[in-house]
Image (spheres, helix red, strand yellow):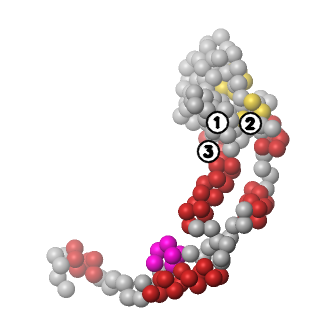
Amino acid sequence: QVQVKASARSNERKHPSAPPPVMRVVQLVFVAAIARGPTEDAAGSDTSCYTTSDSGVSYRGLVDHTKSGRTCQMWTSQHPHHINIADVDEDEFGVGGHNFCRNPNSEMSEPWCYTMDSAMEKETCNIKECPADNEISDLNDVRSHLETAMNWHDCECADQLFGSTETTVDTSVPGDFLQKQAQGGKR
């Protein structure tokens, strides 16, 4: 314990303005929320947007209905419309076992879906365009500016949080120990 206390005091001398560990966690959660972008509102509807620069190809929101209110057909279903997604990379374009709006292969100018209405095969979805300032071109640059503005730095406080980062006792286990234990504990 003496080592831990001394280490904690020396850390305070190195970084007198270092935020407490709890504050660092709060700061990281704040940055993650900013980077994640818009979230669902209380009614449960998806309020995300799509980027016009890629015609919504990167859109991965949860909207499942068209501008006129038609329900989207699952991308893996063949009824009421035949869908050929064999040529489309599910991971790259976000299509698969769901009915969310997408724009695989930039087929339209914005996210769309096959509809459950047999009279209307495809229709664009009611998703707003992202404002240009909502697109973060260089996340590392943004993080760097936030670190400077909020006076963030590595607190180097592992000793405070975990007691110590140094092991003082040999905790290694002989390679045949587990094998001997499995054979009935014979040594």
Dot 3 or dot 1: first in sequence order is: 1
Query: Which amino acid type corresponds to the residue marked 2 in the rendered image?
Result: Tyr
In this view of the protein, can residue 2 be seen by the observer?
A: yes
Coordinates of residue 119 in the picture (x, y in percent): 65, 11
Q: Whole-Å distance between the Cαs marked 3 and 1?
A: 14 Å
Residue 106 drawn in magenta: no
**Residue 102 appears left or right of 4:** right
Coordinates of residue 48 in the picture (x, y in percent): 68, 35
Coordinates of residue 69 in the picture (x, y in percent): 65, 17
SS assignment at label 3: helix
Q: Are marks 1 and 2 in contact (CB under 8 Å)?
A: yes
**Residue 58 appears left or right of 7:** right
Q: Whole-Å distance between the Cαs marked 3 and 2?
A: 18 Å
Q: Residue at x 69, y 50 (%)?
A: 35
Q: Residue at x 54, y 80 (%)?
A: 8
Q: Quadrant of the N terminus?
A: bottom left
Looking at the image, how many numbered discs can be counted on the residues?
A: 3
Coordinates of residue 79 in the picture (x, y in percent): 55, 20
In this view of the protein, can residue 85 be seen by the observer?
A: no
Crowding at mark 1 (Cα within 10 Å: few <14, some 14-19, many 20+): some
Query: Which amino acid type corresponds to the residue marked 1 in the rendered image?
Result: Gly
In the picture shown, does residue 86 fall above or below 170? above
Residues drawn in magenta: 158-163
Query: Which amino acid type corresponds to the residue marked 3 in the rendered image?
Result: Asp
Q: Are marks 3 and 1 in contact (CB under 8 Å)?
A: no
SS assignment at label 1: loop
Tag 1 residue: 61
Viewer-nearest residue: 70 or 155: 155
Q: Whole-Å distance between the Cαs marked 1 and 2?
A: 8 Å
Q: Are marks 3 and 2 in contact (CB under 8 Å)?
A: no
Tag 3 residue: 91
Tag 2 residue: 50
